[in-house]
């Protein structure tokens, strides 16, 4: 199963939905990054690369 053709779910440890903005954020524990993808699955990008393994994602849509 995949979020899109290029985002696999085997290493995802957390997802958070920002329904106001139409974005899904996810933490990839193995590769050490936080990413985002549109709810339509059209655009995706890495937001943060880290040497530590991310374990959770929290979204505050009112605090942008």
Image (spheres, rainbow, N blue to C red):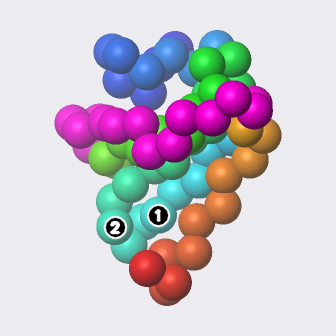
Secondary structure under badge 1? strand
Give the vertical position of 4 relative to 14 (above or below): above
Q: Quadrant of the C terminus?
A: bottom left
- Place residue 13 in its image quadrant: top right
Q: Residues within 10 Å of mark 2 (few under 14, many from 20)?
A: few
Residue positioned 75% across, 31% down in the render: 53
Residue 46 visible in the shown view: yes
Report the side of 13 relative to 33 (left or right): right
What mark, if any, has residue 21 been given in the picture?
2
Residue positioned 34% across, 47% down in the render: 39
Give the vertical position of 9 relative to 13 (above or below): above
> Horizontal and vertical percent for residue 31?
61, 19
Secondary structure under badge 2? loop
Report the side of 23 relative to 50 (left or right): left
> Horizontal and vertical percent for residue 24?
46, 49
Residue positioned 23% across, 38% down in the render: 43
Q: Residues within 10 Å of mark 1 (few under 14, many from 20)?
A: some
Instruction: Tally the numbered discs.
Output: 2
> Horizontal and vertical percent for residue 44?
31, 36
14 is within the stretch colored magenta: no
- Place residue 52 in its image quadrant: top right
Asked if labels 1 and 2 touch by Cβ distance under 8 angstroms, the answer is yes
Give the vertical position of 35 relative to 57 (above or below): above
Residue 12 visible in the shown view: no
Report the side of 58 relative to 61 (left or right): right
Report the side of 25 relative to 42 (left or right): right
Q: Which residues are magenta?
A: 40-53
What residue does disc 1 label?
18
């Amino acid at each position: 199963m995949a979020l899109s053709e290029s985002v696999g779910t085997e290493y995802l440890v957390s997802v958070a939905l920002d329904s106001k903005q139409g974005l899904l954020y996810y933490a990839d524990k193995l590769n050490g990054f936080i990413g985002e993808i549109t709810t339509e699955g059209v655009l995706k990008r890495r937001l943060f690369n880290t040497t530590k393994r991310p374990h959770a994602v929290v979204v505050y849509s009112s605090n942008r």
